[in-house]
Image: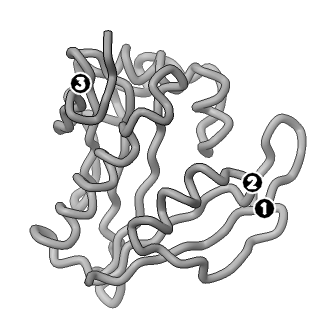
Amino acid sequence: MSSDMSETVIRHAVTEDAGALLQLYSQPDTMADTLQLPHPSLQKWQHRISTLPEGTHMLVACIADRIVGQVTVYINGPARRRHTASFGPGVDSNPRGKGVATAMMRAILDLCDNWLGVERVELQVFADNQAAIGLYERFGFATKGRARAFAVRNGQQVDALYMARFRP
C-alpha cells in the first residue's frame, strides 16, 4: 500500500476510533514524542473522544481507512486568550516521513485561520524532536522559548521548545 499525502484523509474523530487511537498511542515512538502515559485504557480513549470540551477539535488522519495520525486543537478558554489555540499531534511510526503530519498541519491551520478566528497558534515540542521542529518551522512557527526539564521521558528529564505562529 502506498502512503503518500494525497491518500491522507483528515476527519473528525468519532467514539468508534478509540481502539485505533489506543493502538496509535501504544507505539513506543509515538508515545515518546507526546505527553501521553503508557497503557491507557480503551475506556479512557472513548471518554476522551465523547467528552471533548467546548472549543476542542479532535481530528484523525486516515490512509485507506486506517488511522495513522491524530491531532487535537484546543481553543484557549480564558476570555483574554480566546484568540489563541494550541494543539497536540501524534503520528503512527509506520508512515512517518510520508506527509501525514503535513496533512494534519494543513487541516488544523485551515481550521484555526479560516473558521475559528484564531490569531496565534502555539505548541510545545520536545527540543530533540528535529523532524517535528522542522515541520513547524515550514508552517511559519518560530521558537519563543525553552523549558528546561519540561517532562520525563523514559526516566530522563527532557527540554521542550515553545513555538508559535501568527495568522498570516
What amino acid is labelled 2 in the image? Asp
**Mark toward the start of the polypeptide (3 vs 2):** 3
Could you tell me the amino acid type at mark 3?
A: Thr
Q: Residues within 10 Å of mark 1 (few under 14, many from 20)?
A: some
Quadrant, the C terminus? bottom left
Sequence-earlier tag: 1 or 2: 2
Cα distance between the residues tagged 1 and 2: 8 Å
- Left or right of 107 in this view: 36: right
Residue 78 visible in rendering: no
Q: Position of residue 167 (x, y in %)?
A: 28, 81
Q: Position of residue 111 (x, y in %)?
A: 18, 61
Q: With respect to residue 103, does 64 lie above or below? A: above
User: Residue at 17% across / 37% down in the picture?
Assistant: 11
Q: Residues within 10 Å of mark 2 (few under 14, many from 20)?
A: few
In the image, which is nearer the foreground, mark 1 or mark 3?
Answer: 1
| Residue type, mark 1 in image | Asp
